[in-house]
Amino acid sequence: MSAERYLNHPNFGLLYRVCPAGEHQEVYATLYAQRMFFRVTHQARGASFDSIPLLDARFLAEQNLMRERRQQSVDLAMWQKLFDLTFI
């Protein structure tokens, strides 16, 4: 599994994936500013972007890390590195 996934936002340009956030949802951050976060919902006719605060994005990323730890996932190190680069 590759952690690197990008989307193009109509106004804010390139976004990178921070973590999964539920069924058909992921958290993305702006590539250059890295302080604007979006919950992206993938739908049959495209994607919808909802702006979310930094603390909400961090909470969702922490939940992802806990889920990966519980499952003893081989991708845990990758998600931890992405979390550190994004939030620390």
Image (cartoon, rainbow, N blue to C red):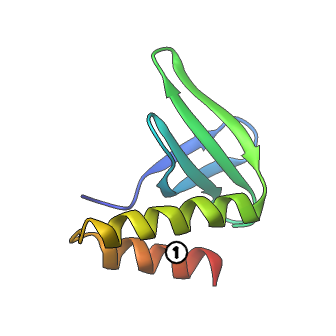
Up-down: is 48 above or below 38? Answer: above
Residue at 44%, 69% (x, y): give it.
Answer: 65
Please, what is the three-letter code of the amino acid marked with disc 1? Phe
Q: Where is residue 1 in the image (x, y as percent from the top left)?
A: 24, 58
- Residue placed most toward the observer, 76 or 49: 76
Q: In the drawing, does residue 28 fall left or right of residue 77? A: right
Assign a secondary structure to mark 1.
helix
**What residue do we see at 57% from left, 51% from top?**
27
Query: Which residue, as the protein is rendered here, is positioned at the far front?
Result: 70
80 above or below 37?
A: below
In the displayed structure, does residue 68 sit left or right of residue 44?
Answer: left
In the image, is residue 6 above or below residue 85?
Answer: above
> In x, y percent, where is residue 13?
67, 47
**Image location (x, y in percent) of residue 23:** 44, 36
- Horizontal and vertical percent position of residue 43: 49, 22
Instruction: Estimate how packed mark 1 is, as few (under 14), some (14 to 19) or many (20 or more) residues with alpha carbons within 10 Å.
Output: some
- Classify residue 17 as left or right of residue 69: right
Circle 1 residue: 83
Which quadrant of the figure contains the C terminus? bottom right
User: Is residue 14 something that shows in the picture?
Assistant: yes
Count of residue discs: 1
Please name the residue shown 58% across and 39% down the image.
Answer: 40
In the image, taking residue 77 as reference, residue 40 lies left or right, namely right
Q: Is residue 31 something one can see in this rendering?
A: no
Residue occupying image coordinates x 64% and y 67%: 58
Q: In this view, does 7 lie above or below 88?
A: above
